[in-house]
Image (tube, helix red, strand yellow):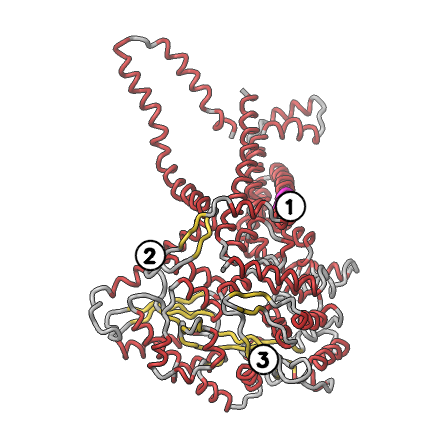
Amino acid sequence: MKRRVIAAGIAMTLGLTATACGSDDGSDSGDKATDGKGKTLTVWIMEGTNPDARPFFKEAEKAFQKKTGAKIHVEYQQWATAQKKFTTAIEGGEDQVPDVAEVGTTWVPQFAETGALVDVTDDVKQSGLNDDLVEGLKDAGTLDGKQYGMPWYAGVRSIVYRKDVFEKHKLKAPTTWKELQSAAKTLKDKEPGMIPFPVAGGAEMFATPFIWGAGGELATESGGKWKSGINSPEAVKGIEFYTGLATKDKVSPAKVNTWTEKEVGDAWGKGEVAMSVNGNWTPKAIVEANPDLKGKLAAVPIPGQTGGMSKSFLGGSYLSTFNTDKKDLAWEFVKMLTTGDFAAKWADETNYFPGQNSELKKIEAKKDPLVEPFAKQMLEAGATVPKTKAYGEIQASKVIPGMVQSILTGKSSVQEAADKAAKDMDAIFAKDK
Amino acid sequence: MKDTLVGGGPEEDTTARRRPAAPRPEHEAALRKKKLVGLTRPWLLLAPSLLVLAGLLLWPLIQVGKLSMQDYAVKFGGGVGTYTGFDHYTDLLTSELLWQTVLPNTAFFAIACVGLTVALGTLVALLLNRLGPTWRLICSIAILAAWAMPAVTGTYVWIWLFQPQDGMVSQIAGSMGLIDPETTNWFTERGPFYAIATLNVVHHGFPFVAITVLAGLMTIPKELYEAGELDGANAWQRFWKITVPTIKPVFLVVTILSTIWDFKVFTQIYLMPGGDGANEEVYNLGVFSYIQAFAKNDYGTGAASAVLLTLLLLAITIVYIRTLFRQGEEDL
């Protein structure tokens, strides 16, 4: 009950701010769209991707004002609560949504379905940007041939390990699942104070590479209908290997059963982890938290079962424009941020990958050993989750973490847990059709 | 407390007695006017707060009730609801998860929390009542600090203490040989999970009980205890025969409020590892409703479970209030 009242309160506050921001742009609606004199764009940006995004946007504001005369008003949002805030604003309509917003790729289907996002397919083609976009990332935000925004940056997870520890025990970076397993087991014997390979129960994207790597799928589509594939023999084999690292090989202690990626990151910072699945944005943060680890980290793509690579989730953010009366001006701002200097600067500051091939190539050319393996993973073995609103709901209701945790705690067998997860997923798919 | 609840009684009696003494016709009109004023004035005085309450509570309540009978889809500029009648309630009430996990968790947890909160609160109140002014002030400030702590902060502190392997409690238990820290994670099992949540909620809730009961204790005349002592009653008997009956209404009020609070606990569960939906075993009604509405975007089922919680609390409150009023009548 209280929640409703809070939601209403938030909606009202949002409404008030939105009107307050919008109040100084009414008179000149007859002007050419990209002449933004006297107009203000409201922009929502996620907090935490860039350690300090404020100077970056100060600069972007100045440049955009010089170019179009329009002002930019940036509001910073938290990843954890933003999806609900967006939903509330979309419900409120044109007055409450931002003009431009950073939208997580997995949210795009949900927001697009409500009609809030602008289909920019033609604008992208006209600007000649189309061919330069990173395919996997472009695909993530394209539904039924319509692209809902510009890919801004992307991240991918690979394996990060402690070079010093591996060298000390004469271990090689793993290239197959067997090698991964034996390296972890050796580490368990020789480094009792460290976690050889955390099997974090709360981290969905730690488990998915093993499902994909074994040839399984999260869900498959046929005739517009989605069906879960998580209890297929292949997927179960992958889950069995991944959870077996904790339940059989004991290379991940019980405390990790409830960990999310955040706790894994904290443990890295304390120097407790020897090897784990990690995002390409994490090495910098780990070294910042613990300067002693400088030069001691290395990365390698997630190995395939018997060689090659296992696919890993290619996630990222779009800059999308919303259906407001300033959408043309908003598109100008998006273009400015996602191309050229500002795109390069953002990628550099955040340690994420840019959404354009040309920019990505520049980063690859630097041959940084902590960047190259990730770039390889992204370009050759990136995967997306099912592109449907229902999958966002499956993620939000923690179906895969629930499955992994119930195996780790011994409450159900791998097959039982996978069957239950498939049932839960199918129930959500069925509801949304 | 008792005085305010039965306060209307004697006054009405006096006006009723006075009435037959004023039958003179010239006063009839004045009398009628007075009656009208008497009838409308209380409502006029209540109107502002009733309006606020209606706006803040009744309106959302009606909306939630409406939503619970719809399939609701968010759309740009205003969502679309399709009426589905009582479908969500049927689904909900026939779901195994509700009867085997959600309701037992909610009910047993609330009963344990209310019992412990009231017991601990009363003990602390008795202690405070015996202390001198300086120590009473110091102790009050100490317990008020526990009360003033935001639920989020408090929860993180408890999580921290019980953190598997690294938390203080885990390390002590490990060094005493009670558990194997490497293989024990208290947050994944229903029992230990709720034991930790109970500690958290009781710690956060007992100061209110203590302060309220203390206020009640200070109104009990010393003479009653002196008389009891002269009659040879020991401390145990004096507590149950004098203290408890005298401030029973206070106990009823703190119990009602604690029950309401402890049934709708959300933050303290949601923030615990595995409490955010990953572990179905530890769902309570609050978390269940939240997951349905805001994770699965199934606003109808979420609203239906919220209505269920409201009805449950209403039923409990009605029972309490009836007991309270019966108590009042007996005292007359």
Callout 1: chain: B
Q: In this picture, is B111 found above or below A32?
A: above
Q: Residues within 10 Å of mark 3 (few under 14, many from 20)?
A: few
Q: Do the residues bearing badges 2 and 3 touch, measured as CB atoms within 8 Å? A: no
What mark, if any, has residue B113 been given in the picture?
none
Give the CA distance from mark 3 to mark 1. Answer: 49 Å
Q: Is residue B89 magenta?
A: no
Q: How many marks?
A: 3
Under mark 3, the amino acid is Pro
Under mark 2, the amino acid is Leu
Callout 3: chain: A
Label 3 and label 1 in one chain: no
> What residue is shown with label 2?
A16
> What residue is shown with label 1?
B104
- The residue depicted at 31 percent of the width and 22 percent of the height is B36
Q: Position of residue B273 (x, y in %)?
A: 62, 60
Q: Residues within 10 Å of mark 2 (few under 14, many from 20)?
A: some
> What residue is shown with label 3?
A291
Q: From where the camera sits, is residue B53 visible? A: yes
Bounds of the magenta span?
B106-112
Q: Position of residue A368 (x, y in %)?
A: 55, 88
Q: Is residue B110 magenta?
A: yes
Give the CA distance from mark 1 to mark 2. Answer: 42 Å
Q: In this picture, is A42 found above or below B157?
A: below
